[in-house]
Image (cartoon, helix red, strand yellow):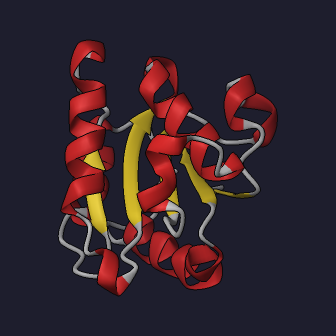
Amino acid sequence: MISYEAELYDRVERLMQDTGPLATVSLLGFVEKDRNKARTAVDKLGEATSWSFVDLRETKPADVEGELTAGLLSRRPAKNEPLVVAIRHDRLAPPILDLVRAVIDKSSPRMSPFNSLSLLLVVDGVAAHADLHASLKRVPYEEYLP
């Protein structure tokens, strides 16, 4: 549950300090029943200047790949800018899972320009590792709001 408006922002910032230089995937999960509180906290992530942000929580499945691509292309690679992506656990589209796999494995030829990418998933609707979608259980760094 989100305790204060900037809690997601603060947690993402700390997680990026810890994992950002590793060029990998990390995950911050949370469950918040008050949808207005969740929306406000996630929207605050878009105000950051130290990462690019894409909110896919309400994106139609057919549009997810285009939104992810736009987010990847909007990054400032010279600054090794991380990409923060907000998703809903109950609406995981294949392009999200493909990106996670590619960043973890560094295996996709399409991803070679992004080999130094740090990806942080903010997952709305999950509060513990056991509740994660099987494809997200490979994410090496996880944190959850209590």
Q: Where, by quadrant of the figure, is residue 10 drawn?
A: bottom left
Q: Residue at x 52, y 43 (%)?
A: 109
Q: Using residue 85 as the reference point, say whether residue 23 is left or right of it.
A: right
In the depicted view, which residue is nearer to us: 49 or 29?
49
Q: Residue at x 75, y 24 (%)?
A: 134
Say which of 37 and 81 sits in front: 81
Residue 59 visible to the viewer: yes
Residue at 26% x, 66% y: name it. 75
Q: Is residue 126 above or below residue 48?
A: above
Please state the horizontal and vertical placement of residue 62, each as a whole percent of the image: 25, 14
Q: Nearer the viewer, residue 9 or 36?
A: 9
Placement of the C terminus among the 4 image quadrants: bottom right
Furthest residue in direction right, as rendered: 130
Q: Residue at x 62, y 58 (%)?
A: 26
User: 123 left or right of 41?
Assistant: right
Query: Total number of numbered labels?
Result: 0
Q: Up-down: is 137 above or below 54?
A: above
Q: Is residue 72 left or right of residue 98?
A: left
Name the spot of residue 116 as percent of width and height, x first. Answer: 52, 70
Q: Is residue 36 visible?
A: no
Q: Determine whether, in the image, residue 65 is placed left or right of residue 112.
A: left
Percent position of residue 58, x then y: 24, 27
Q: State the image quarter where residue 9 is shown.
A: bottom left
Q: Residue furthest front?
A: 109
> Does 39 sit above or below residue 145?
above
